[in-house]
Amino acid sequence: MKEYAYFPGCSLEKIAISYHLSALETTNQLGVKLTELEDWNCCGATAYFHVDELLAYTLSARNLAMAEKIGPEVVAPCSACYKNMYFTNKHLQDDPDLADHINDALHEDDLSYSGKMIVKHLLEVFANDIGPDAIKSKVVSPLSGVKVAAYYGCQILRPRKDHEDVEQPQFFEALMAATGASPVDYPLKMTCCGGSLLLSSRPAAYGMIHNLLHEAERVEADVIATACPLCQVNLECYQQQINQEYGTHFSIPVVYFTQLIGLALGIPAKKLGFGKEFLSPMKAIEEIKNMHNQQEAIAQ
Amino acid sequence: MTEKIGVYVCHCGTNIAGTVDVEDVSKWAAEELKSRGVVVARDYKFMCSSLGQELIEKDIHEQGLTRVVVASCSPHLHEPTFRNACARAGLNPYLFEMANIREQDSWVTTDKVEATKKAKALIAAAVNRVAYQQPLNSLFVPIDPNVLVVGGGITGIQAALEIANSGQKVYLVEREPSIGGHMAQFDKTFPTLDCSACILTPKMFDVGNHKNITLLTWSEVEKVEGYIGNFTVTIRKKARYIDTSVCTGCGVCWEKCPKKVVDDVFEAGLGKRKAVYTPFPQAVPKFPVIDRENCTFFLKGTCKACQKFCPTGAINFDDQDEIITIKVGNIILATGFDLFDPRRIPQYGYGRLPNVFTSLEFERLSNAAGPTGGKIVLRDGVTVPKSVAIAHCVGSRDKNYNSYCSAICCMQSLKFAHLVHEKTGAEVYNCYIDIRTPAKGYDEFYQRLLDEGTHFIRGKVAEVTSTPRTPEEEGKLVVQVEDTLIGKQRRLPVDMVILSCGLEPRRDHHKIAHLFGLSCSADGWLIERHPKLDPVATMTDGVFIAGVCQGPKDIPASVAQGAAAAARVLSIIGQGEIQIEAATAIVDETSCVGCTQCISSCPYQAIEFLSDKGKAHVNEALCKGCGTCVGSCLSKSISLKHFTDEQLVAEMVGAMQVMKSFQTMEVA
């Protein structure tokens, strides 16, 4: 069983607990072990790197040092955590002076970091390491007929990391297709969800969320699959406000990709954290699947 | 020391004298290098002038100089000048040496004292070296008057006609079934808007009927051996499955052929052709080819419709590739370009959004002989666009793809804008970075477009999307672009987007370069001998380049280069024989062990193995004197004439002694 150091990040403790639960359940089913870091701390989030870079790197490096005790690869399910860890790691690798400096600080905590970790997003682990074929072979309850908008969000691919195709990636869609669902062409799949603009400039954020929901509706998506807690919150929790603001009638479920994979693997919905969302996709998914199966039966 | 050496220090106006104290240098040479054989040292404003050269000649006559050193610019520029001056005065030109105190000193050193010291060191090095130089004699080889032209686009056509009209024989090789190249695909040509086919096809016809031109279409060069004046070229004539001795080009075969194939080459994927086809009606030669990959008979073993209906019995399914060998004295490469593939810029949506077109697709769309009969319509084949955006610089001037300017796209885009406007009345938006219209009549064309009401938006297109944000954008392609003149983001809802794609080297440019012994720039274009003064010759004598294979250029420039290359070739043919550089490698047969290491290291295939003696042998006519074999020889049996160990060591010692003496002086 392949083992990864697992850095859940703060969101997965509470608001995105369903992401946490479904990530552990599905990886377990697929023969991958996520071992949570001992005593992990904040990733630095959006703000800290703009307040004090050195302290922010140190904070993030502490998590890397902890992860190194578990294994050579660390995985983050949250896109912001992933981005911060990825670039901290890269800066430490590229700048030996910075690495020395930060290791001095880590020594205070009896820690040290070699700079050799590989930082991955959970979506990459599913798409590349496990792979759609392995998932497909374990699907017991295919999500046939369900139209999924695979929404990457911005931070997985931007700023540029080492992905080959950052303009029109297809790996998320391939993953969704493996569950039996039908990924739709969702042109805004990498457009920002508004991020933390909701706190500083609500109208601007509403505009961005509206665009994403409008496009999802236009391409007739039944559900939006996300790989980031902030994307999930922005897209799901504000639909009512957006509807009031724009006179629209959006009601599109937004779930974590691990939840959809979990359903296809036959894991009970409750174990995947379903039931905690504002807009449940469960009824819709069941209806679509039944309808699809009936059509299949008639066709046969 | 028995040699009498003359040293001449050039001012090069202020190019050298502005940084190097030339008078001090010449005085220093006269005194300090006297012990090394220097009998005269002078400085002069321009050594390359006729007066400067006469100075050298006079000293050789009057002072009996046996060696000459000129300290001036790069040997690349004036070595032949001074060698000739020596030869005129009766001194073997290889007893001359050049010290480069311009490119390697005055131009790259700001400190005058340091620059003067360096000039002295370089001159001392040259003086030390020249004493060991040996007189060498150049070889003369006869020139075979036949010429090979590779590539049957407008450039190759022009070059072939110029040479053939002068009475020399030309072999024109083209890999496609017909000559014509990209120009045959275009609709109109800028800035005069004359029809491309109308001005091209008469030239194609002339090539096809010229008694001095042997046309080899559907053929590719496989091997090139030999050297200037004496090339042996192996060519594969691909099986055409048509007996050209009886085919009349009547067209019954392609009328009867039941198999339709998407034409990715000539019609840029917009139209279809048959499995037996000529790419276009005016094809030269008129003979079709059978596309083996798609022919029903080759795939399934039955059909033969073409054979049944052919009135002259010209279809031959047993045809085989034929390998032929020809002898030529000179080669002109006019291999052209490939269009940049805009799929590499996914945010522009080509291949994903149906109504995004490439420039070549648009040419076919607008061409009266094209798949829509010249109607500009959307991908559905019927809808006429009401608004069209043209994105400039697609894949050009972009460090993510090609950093160079493709030179033709501005004018091409203006032409497109005019054609769309004229044929459909649609609103046209040109999104450009800069408009570059430098040639004759080009800027006037731009002014004309401005008057016609085409919209010009200064900004590189960021994205083409089908995602609407407003009701007006529903069902449209939206071009997101920053208008840098007003400093605002704009979203242009349009029906059609044309990507003005850049020009790229042929996908197999490395193979072409290797085949003919040429080098490519980092971008992949073939490198000319000199970017300004020798743009069509290459570092391989007897091989010339013309047209876009040398770098992006438009039709007039390509034609000019084709003719220029022809003129260069004719001047060589006119000489009858050619002088070969004497600084070549030579094998000492007494110590050569015949390991053949040198043969594999030689980039010019100049070394052969004498199997009777078991020794390597350098063909002096082919050798470029690069010295690679000298370094690779394990038994130290190869030396390079004019670059012997003795000469190089003397040169280094000369420089180092002087530098050391300067250091000692400083310490003291």
Image (cartoon, rainbow, N blue to C red):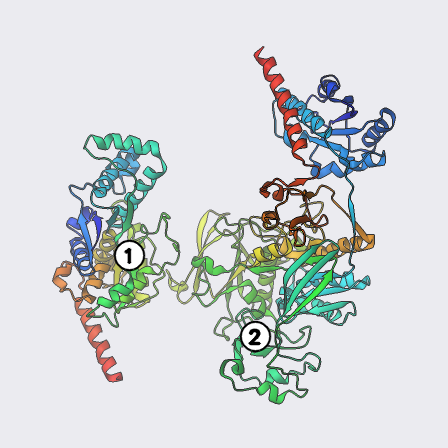
Residue bearing mark 2: B371
On the rendered structure, is B363 left or right of B207?
left
For numbered disc 2, what is the local secondary structure?
loop
Quarter location, residue B83: top right
Residue B251 image offset from top left, x and y in percent: 64, 82
Residue B549 image offset from top left, x and y in percent: 63, 56
Q: Amino acid at mark 2?
A: Pro
* Residue closer to the observer: A173 or B72: B72
Dot 2 surroundings within 10 Å: few (below 14), some, or many (20 or more)?
some
Q: Amino acid at mark 1?
A: Asp
Rendered view: A203 above or below B254: above
Comparing marks 1 and 2, which lies closer to the viewer? 1
Residue B437 image offset from top left, x and y in percent: 63, 52
Residue bearing mark 1: A129
Badge 1 and badge 2 both on one subunit:
no
Residue B219 image offset from top left, x and y in percent: 64, 68
Which residue is pictured at 61% across the width and 43% down the height? B628
For numbered disc 1, what is the local secondary structure?
helix
Quarter location, residue A96: top left
Residue B236 visible? The answer is yes
Q: How many marks?
A: 2
